[in-house]
Amino acid sequence: MEKIRRTKVSDLLKSETFGTIVNARGWVRSRRGSKKVNFVALNDGSTINNLQIVVDVESFDEEIIKKITTGSCISVNGELVASQGKGQSAELQAKDIVILGEADNTYPLQKKGHTMEFLREIAHLRPRTNTFGAVFRIRHNMAMAVHDFFHKKGFYYFNAPLITSSDCEGAGEMFQVTTMNLYDLKKNEDGTINYDYDFFGKQAALTVSGQLEAELAAMSMGACYTFGPTFRAENSNTPRHLAEFWMIEPEMAFVEIDENMDLAEEFVKHCLKWALDNCMEDISFLNKMFDKELIERIHFVLEHDFKRLTYTEGVKILEEAVAKGHKFEYPVFWGADLASEHERYLVEDHFKRPVILTDYPKEIKSFYMKQNDDDKTVRAMDILFPKIGEIIGGSQREENLEKLEKRAKEMEVPTKDIWWYLDTRRYGTAPHSGFGLGFERLLLFVTGMTNIRDVIPFPRTPNNCEF
Amino acid sequence: MEKIRRTKVSDLLKSETFGTIVNARGWVRSRRGSKKVNFVALNDGSTINNLQIVVDVESFDEEIIKKITTGSCISVNGELVASQGKGQSAELQAKDIVILGEADNTYPLQKKGHTMEFLREIAHLRPRTNTFGAVFRIRHNMAMAVHDFFHKKGFYYFNAPLITSSDCEGAGEMFQVTTMNLYDLKKNEDGTINYDYDFFGKQAALTVSGQLEAELAAMSMGACYTFGPTFRAENSNTPRHLAEFWMIEPEMAFVEIDENMDLAEEFVKHCLKWALDNCMEDISFLNKMFDKELIERIHFVLEHDFKRLTYTEGVKILEEAVAKGHKFEYPVFWGADLASEHERYLVEDHFKRPVILTDYPKEIKSFYMKQNDDDKTVRAMDILFPKIGEIIGGSQREENLEKLEKRAKEMEVPTKDIWWYLDTRRYGTAPHSGFGLGFERLLLFVTGMTNIRDVIPFPRTPNNCEF
C-alpha cells in the first residue's frame, strides 16, 4: 500500500478537498451493505462521528473484506468525496485497505445496547463506544478548562503529596500505605507495630485532601490550586462514591468569603461554557441518548446569578416547605447536614437557580473554617446545583492561631501531626480562603451520566480494582 | 484603613500609573533604613521581585513599625511612585499599614543563606524564599507547557488509576495499599493472608506507571497522555530518586518509532521554550545563584537537532573512547545498561548535542517494547541530555499478541493480571508508540537544581513523609 500520511477522522470530516487521496486509520464500528458495495463506519477516537468508507467489494480480495469486522483496525487509502448521506460532509471511496488488527466474533462490543454495568466490566474497551468516547473527551476538556482558568488568573498549580502522615479532616477512613512484610510485622515491646521498619519510618496513608498543603502554598505564593487524585476508604457502594477520585482545590491568600464565592461561581461557569464551546457534538449525543435535559441544565446554570443566602435562611425555607406539606425523606432542622433532596429543593423548586449557602453550623464543618462571632456558625460556602446538589464546598479559613488550635482540640484533630500547618498562622498569617470541587462531580453534571463510575476511566470501589 | 482592592506585586512593578493610591499585601522579606525612613521589601509570591515600601517612620505608630519584621504579613495602602533605585520601576510610598500577621524572632527564615538541607526540613515555609518561589513558579509553568502541547495536538488527558492490582514493569518495588487491621490479619487455611477482607478483595498497590492504561486509551481514542503521580518503594537515598513523583506518559495509535522520536523532541523543546518565554526572571535568578550555565544549557538543547543513533553505535563510540584512554567508572560493553556518565559523554563530549539512542538490547528493556527482527534488540528510544543523562524513555510497543505474550512469559510478567492489556492486541491491534518523562527530571534540567527533593513541594523518600 502506498504510504500516505494519516489524517484524523475529525479533520477528514471537516475537509472539503474532495478528489484528493488520503489515508485514514481507525477501528471499524460496523460494516453493512450489499454484495457490490459495503459501507464501513470507521472511528479513530478523534470525534464521535464515524467516517464512512465506501468499499467497492469486487475491487478487493475476499479475505480482506471478511476481516473488516466490528472491532478490527484498518488503514484505508482512498479518495475523499462529498457524502451523499445527510448530515455528513465527506466520505472515503476506498482504493486500498490494510487490516492492521483483526477482531473475531469474541470481541465484546459486537453490537450496540450493552448495559452500563457490562461496560464497566470491560472498562479497558469501553472508550471504543460512542458514550465513553464522548465522556472521556469531555473529561479531557474539563481538565483543560480548569488549568486554563487558574493559569490565566495567576494561580500556581501546586502538587500536594499523595502519601501523607497526617489526616486533613481529622476523620475520613484512609488507605494505609506500607512496604512492611505483613507476614513478619515487627512489634514494639508494648505490642504495637514498630513503624521504624516501614518505608517512611512512621505510619503513612493516602491523602484525603490536598487542602492543608495548598494553604501553605497560598500563604507564600499568593494563589494556588491542586488538581490531583485523593482517596477515601469508605465502604460505600453508591453511584456517588469512589475510593479514588480527582479533586481541584484552589486556595488564595488575602481573599475573604465573598471573593471566594465570586471566584467559585466564575470558575464553574467557565468550565461549563468551555464544555459548550468545545464539546457540543459529544454533549448533544449524551443529551439525546441519556439525559434530554442536559444541555438545558447547563444553560440554566450559565444564565443565572447564583442565589446567595445563609444556611439558617435556607433551613427556614425548607421548614416552611415542610409546614406547607412538602415531604422530604430526611428531617430538616437547624444543625442538620442537608441532604441532596433539600439542596435540590432550594435550587430546583424554590429559587430556580443555583444556590450558595453560607455560614453553616460549626459542628457539621471542618476545624479549619473561619469562626463567626456568633460562636455558632463558620464562614463556609457550599454551591448547590440542580440534579446533583452540592458541587463545591469551601470556606474562609480560620487565620487566628489560638482560635484554630482551640477548635482543632474540640474536634479532636491531632495538632501535633500538623505543626507545619499551624505555622502558617504563627508566622505572617493573613485572611485566606479556598474551595474544593470533586472533578467527577463536575463531570456528572456536564455529561448527564448518573453513576460516578462512568466518568472516570478505571473506577476504584469496594472489591473493584481491576485494570 | 481605607478599603482598596489589592493589586499583585507583579502588576504593581509593571505599572506606571504613578501618583495613584494602591493596596499591596504580602510577606516582609526585610526592613532596613534609618530612624527617619524605612525600606520594606514586600513579596506576595507573584514574582521573584520584591516591591519596595518606603515608610516615613515618624508618620506611623511605633508599635506598627516594630511589628514589620521578617516573615510578617502586612497590607499597605500607598502612593505608587517611580523608583529611584536602579532596576526597579515602581515603589510604594506608604500611607497606611495594617499588620495582618506577626512573625516573631522564632521565624525560621530570619536571614538568607540557609542550607538546602535545612530548607527541606521546613518545606512548609520554603516557598517563601526566592529560590523555592522561583522553582515552584517554574514547576507550574512546565505543567502548563505540558498540557498546552498535548491539547493543541489533539491528545486527550487520561487519568490512569493510582491504586492498581497489576505491576506494569513486572518488577519495581511497590507500596502496598490496604485497609486491613494489621493487628488482626485474616488468614486462609494455607496460612496466606486472606485478601477477601481487604478493601478491594485482592492485594492492591500504588502504580509505578500509567503506561499500560494509557495504551488502552490510545487504542480507542487515538492519542492520549497521562500526567500524574507514580510511586516507587525503592530504598534509594540519592539526589535522583523520589518515592512519589509525577510522570508524563503520552501514547499514540498509528505511530511508529520515528514519529515517536519526532514528537518527543518537539515536546521537550516546547517545554524549554515555554520556560524561556514565561519564566526568564526566575531562571535568571537560578542561573545567577546556583548554576551559571543553566540558560546556556537550555539554549544548547533548543538550538540543536537531536542526534539519533542506535545503542549499538553508541556503545561502539564509548568503547573507542575507552580504547583512547577515557576513564569511566562503570564498564562499557554491548548489553550493558548505560550509566549517566556514558550518556553524558555521548552528549557533552562526542556529539555536543542531545542524543536519541534507539534499538536497545531486549534484555535491559521492558516486555512491551516492539521486538526487532534481529531477535536481539527492541525498538526503544532514550533521549539523553547534558548534565542529567536520560530524560525521556520510550518505544514503539509490541502490537503482535503472540510475540508480546512470549516475551512477557520469558520475563516472568504475570500475564493473567494484564488480560485486559493483552486484549488491545487481541481486538483491533495496530502499531503504536509512546514515551515517559519524569516531570521532576525535566524540572532539574530547567531549574538547575541538583537534588530532586528541591523541585517537588513535599518530597517523599525513605524515612521522610512529613507535611
Image (cartoon, coloured by chain):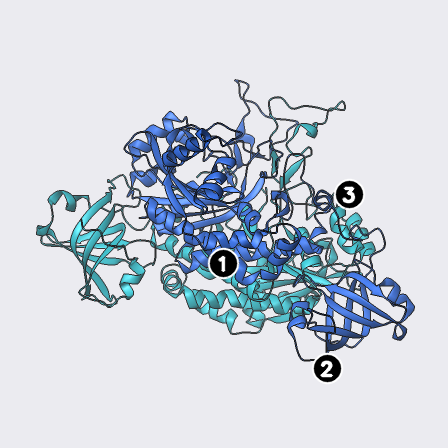
Chain colours: A cyan, B blue
* Badge 2 vs badge 1, beta-carbon distance below 8 Å: no
Dot placed on the residue nearer the N-terminal end, 2 or 1:
2
Badge number at residue B19: 2
Q: Is residue A327 visible?
A: no
Q: Residue furthest front?
A: B324
Out of B37 and A315, give the one closest to the viewer: B37
Height in image: B399 above or below B294? above
Q: Position of residue A161 (x, y in %)?
A: 62, 46
Q: Which residue is mark 3?
A: A416
* Badge 3 vs badge 2, beta-carbon distance below 8 Å: no
The kind of residue on which mark 2 rests is Gly
Q: Position of residue A176 (x, y in %)?
A: 62, 36
Q: Gap between marks 3 and 2, in whole Å?
A: 48 Å
The kind of residue on which mark 3 rests is Lys
Q: Secondary structure at mark 3?
A: helix
Q: Secondary structure at mark 2?
A: loop
Instruction: Please tell me in which quadrant of the rendered image residue A103 appears.
Output: top left
Q: Which image quadrant: the C terminus of chain A?
A: top left
